[in-house]
Image: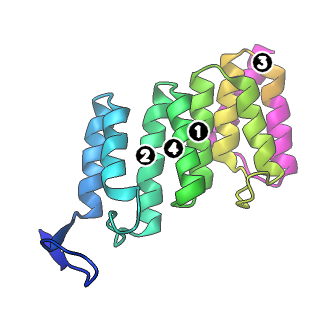
Amino acid sequence: FDADWFHSEHESGPPRYFIHIPTKAYYSAIKICLAGGEPELAHSILKAGCIGPSDEVDMRLPDSSRSHLFNLVMSGYSQIGDFENAQLLLDEMQSIGPRPTEHTYAAFITSLAMADKLDEATNVIDSMLRNENGDGILPGSSSFGACMLAALKAKAYQQVLGLNTKMIDAGISPNSQSYFGVVLASTRL
């Protein structure tokens, strides 16, 4: 392992050591927790290495890697429909970092879909289109696909087609998930 010694001239007491844990180890530990249906444990691992004041967090972990790990944990919450913890994770990303991505919002919308929160999922898409979060992140096909999932679960088939129109009007190309949603909704109608 890679241990770094740190001691400030303003500190008293014994020197502190920081252990650098490779990104792959965080990723593997989080994946194991999620495979076991333990997103809270995965979140704890995430907090241990990626959240907190810069003097307590291994800042050698690049923001892109930290963002990927956050998205992974959020996806774990999404799979069980735990939109409250997914919201807390999104709030952490928006306030202290790392910066959310379109995939972050897609995972959050999926958590809303799994919890049968169609109106809230649609509101997230609309707020992204209006840039209400101020982060400039527009919904992509992943976010629209997640919102279509919410509409399909609610049997709001006309709304699925409306989301498809909104997505195309925004210049976003469909992906396989959104295309499947449109085909399924059209068939049901």
Q: Amino acid at mark 2?
A: Leu
Residue at the (32%, 67%) spot, across then down:
58
Is 103 located above or below residue 118 in the figure? below
Report the residue that reaches farthest toward the bottom.
9
Q: Earlier in the sequence, mark 2 or mark 3?
A: 2
Q: Earlier in the sequence, mark 1 or mark 3?
A: 1
Q: For residue 7, which quarter of the picture?
A: bottom left
Q: CA distance from mark 2 to mark 3?
A: 28 Å
Tag shown at residue 79: none
Residue 10 appears in the picture as rendered: yes
Is 30 located above or below residue 83 in the figure? below
Residue at the (27%, 59%) spot, across then down:
24
Q: Amino acid at mark 3?
A: Ala
Q: Main secondary structure of the magenta part?
A: helix
Q: Is residue 184 magenta?
A: yes
Q: CA distance from mark 1 to mark 2?
A: 11 Å
Tag shown at residue 89: 4
Q: Which residues are magenta?
A: 161-189
In the rendered structure, the answer to whether residue 6 lies left or right of residue 83 reads: left
- Quarter holding the N terminus is bottom left
Q: Amino acid at mark 1?
A: Phe
Tag shown at residue 108: 1
Task: Identify the residue position indicated by label 2 in the image.
Answer: 72
Mark toward the viewer: 1 or 3: 1
Numbered disc 2: secondary structure: helix
The image shows residue 144 at horizontal and vertical percentages of 71, 40
Which is more toward the observer, 95 or 67?
A: 95
Are dots 2 and 3 in contact, CB under 8 Å? no
Mark toward the viewer: 1 or 4: 4
